[in-house]
Image: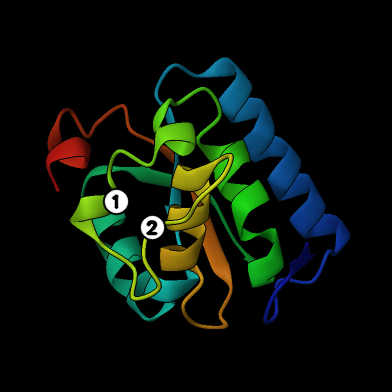
Amino acid sequence: LKPAYGFAPTPTNQIMAQNALEFCRSSPTAVVVTVWPTAHSQTAAVRSWLQESCQIIHETELTIESAGGVATCLALYHGEDWVHSNCWYNESPLPSGPPAGPYAGAKWKAELAWRVEAPMTVFVVDSKEAGGRLWRG
């Protein structure tokens, strides 16, 4: 796990990340938005969409190689049953077929999310003013 493309771990970036973490811990309106590597080309559109109804508290890019995809999905979707069951597979079948074994859902999501080599972009936003717009897209 390392910062990507101009997001060097400078003291300023580390302070901003620390502030974003504190905001997430303390605010009921904190939301983490992830743009997966597969959708990296859409990051500017996501940023623009978020700015319409939210305050972006922090943005960073992370390089996570595809080998770390399953672990990343397990961390981001901790506690969700589908990471074990793969119940959403039919929404986006894989050419190689459904993953087998433990964490089939996380394997499926990782395969979809890491189709290209690109960074994962993470936004921390304050959704206080968004109302339901953030969830309806």
Q: Where is residue 118 in the image (x, y as percent from the top left)?
A: 56, 80
Q: Where is 111 relative to 130, above or below? A: below
Give the mark count. Answer: 2
- Would you say residue 57 is visible in this rendering? no
Tell me which amino acid carries mark 2: Pro
Tell me which amino acid carries mark 1: Tyr
Is 7 left, or right, of 84 in this rendering?
A: right
Q: How crowded is mark 2: few (under 14 residues within 10 Å), some or many (20 or more)?
A: some
Q: Position of residue 46 (x, y in %)?
A: 31, 63
Label annotation for residue 67: none
- Of label 1 and label 2, which has the lower sequence position? 1
Instruction: Kindly indicate whether the residue at mark 2 contacts the one at mark 1 (C-beta within 8 angstroms).
Output: yes
Depth check, front residue: 34 or 99: 99
Return the residue at label 1.
89
SS for tag 2? loop
Q: Quadrant of the N terminus?
A: bottom right
SS for tag 1? helix
Of all residues shown, which one is farthest toward the right? 11
Q: Where is 113 relative to 74, above or below? A: below
Q: Distance between the residues labelled 1 and 2?
A: 7 Å
Depth check, front residue: 80 or 76: 80
Label annotation for residue 98: 2
Q: Where is 40 relative to 101, above or below? A: below
